[in-house]
Image: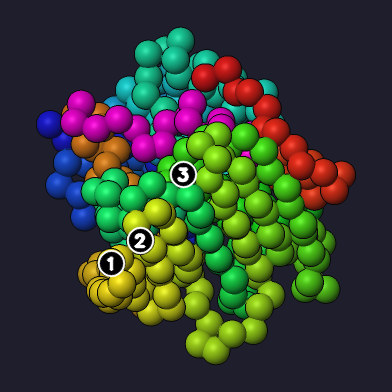
Amino acid sequence: MTVRVALIGCGFFARNHMEAWRDLPGAEVVAVCDLDPAKSQGFAADFGARPFTDAASMLDEVRPDLADVATTVPSHRPLVELAARHAGAVICQKPFATTLEDGQAMVAACRAAGVPLFVHENFRWQKPWREIAARVAAGGIGTPAFLRLSFRHAYDIYANQPYLAEEPDLALTDVGLHLFDLARWLMGDVARVSCETQRLNPRVKGQDAFQAVLRHASGAVSSVECSFFTHDAPDPFPQTLGRIEGDRGTLELLEGHRLVHHAAGAATETDAEPPVPAWGAKPWHLVQDSVLAFQAHVIEALAGRAEPGPSGAHNLGTLAVTLAAIEAARTGTSVAPRATGS
Ligand SMILES: NC(=O)c1ccc[n+]([C@@H]2O[C@H](COP(=O)([O-])OP(=O)(O)OC[C@H]3O[C@@H](n4cnc5c(N)ncnc54)[C@H](O)[C@@H]3O)[C@@H](O)[C@H]2O)c1
C-alpha cells in the first residue's frame, strides 16, 4: 500500500521532507500547501503534487493517509488539530509546541480521532546515534551512567532561518530539545534539570548557548551543551559530538563521524558516516539521511511494524525538560520537569 501524504508548509526544511518522500517507495506526496502560493506552486512543479494555499481545503479535498506539518511552531496546534480530523496520521515538525498545554491539546486531538501522531525528531535518527543506541542496547558498555552531548559550531543558521534571530530561548528551543530527546532516548526519563545560558552573538536577540545537567530517574547524569557561536576548525556543524560511559565501556563520537568503542582495555574505531542521498550534499548528508530514516520509520510504524519514535505523547516529556531548563536558567535553580499526563 502506498501512503498518500499531504505536506503543510513548503519552506526551507520541508524540501528535505519532499526529497525523502520521493525516495521512499511506500509513500507519495499527493498535495502540498503553503500560505504563499509561490512556495506551494514551486514545490508542486518540482515534485509533481497538487498545490494549495489553504490547509483546510486541501485536507478536506484530499483526505490523505498522512499529513506532514512542516511549518514553524506558532501554527502547529491549529494545523495538527485540523489534520487530526481529516488525515489517517499526522507528523508535526519540532519544536512540537511552546507550552505543555498546546502539546497536550494536540496529543488529545489525535487520540480522540484515533490518529497516530509523530514528532519529526530526527537527531535520534542520525546514523551515528542509531549505531550508539544499538551498541548500548546490546550491552556494549554495560549500564550507562554518564552521557555528554555537544552541539557547538559557528555556522550561520540565520541565513536560511532568519526567524531564529528573534527567538528568546533560541538554543534551548531550537536544538536543545533535539539533544534532550536524544538524552531521554539513551538514558531514560529526566528527574531534574539545571542549566546555564549565554547570549554570545550580538546579532541575535536570545540565548544562543547553554549547558544543561540532567539527572535521570535511573540515577544517570547527562551533560548537554550547545552553542551557535563557537570558533572551531574544522567546524563540526552539523554533528552532535558526545560520549556515553557505562560500567563496562565507553562510546565516543568524534568529529568526522568517528565512533570509538572503549571496552576491556582496547579502543576500536569505526566510521559512522551516513551515505549522501542522491539529492544531498556534505555536510548536510547527516541531516538529510536522518530525515530519510525518520520518514522510512513512519511508513514502518503505519504498517504496524514499529512504535512511533517519538510519538507526540513521548515528546511532551521532552518539551517538559526543555521548559524546565528554561526555568532553571532563569531562576538559577534545579527544576523537575512537569508531569505531562501521557
Ligand atoms: N528537524 C530538523 O532538523 C529541523 C531543521 C530545520 C528546521 N526545522 C523545523 O522545521 C519547521 C519549519 O522551519 P523552516 O525553517 O522550514 O521554516 P520556513 O519559515 O522556511 O517555512 C515554513 C513555511 O510554512 C508556511 N506556513 C506557515 N503557516 C502556514 C499555514 N497555516 N498553512 C500553510 N503554510 C503555512 C510558511 O509560509 C513557510 O513557507 C520549524 O518548526 C523548524 O524548527 C527542523
> Which is more N-terminal, label 1 or label 3?
3
User: Which residues lie in the magenta part?
Assistant: 304-322
Residue 244 falls in image quadrant: bottom left
* Cα gap from disc 2 to disc 3, whole angstroms: 15 Å
Question: Does 36 sit left or right of 116 as displayed?
Answer: right
Residue that sits furthest to the bottom in the current view: 233
Q: State the residue lying farthest toward the right.
A: 331
In the structure shown, which secondary structural element does the residue marked by tag 2 occupy? strand
Relative to 122, is 315 above or below?
above
Whichever of callouts 2 and 3 sits on the residue coming sooner in the sequence is 3
Between marks 3 and 1 in the image, the one whose residue lies nearer the viewer: 1
The mark nearer the N terminus, 1 or 2, is 2
- Residue 264's mark? 1
Q: Residues within 10 Å of mark 2 (few under 14, many from 20)?
A: many
Q: Residue at x 24, y 70 (%)?
A: 275
Instruction: Name the residue carrying label 3.
Output: 187
Picture mark count = 3
Amino acid type for the residue under numbered disc 2: Gly
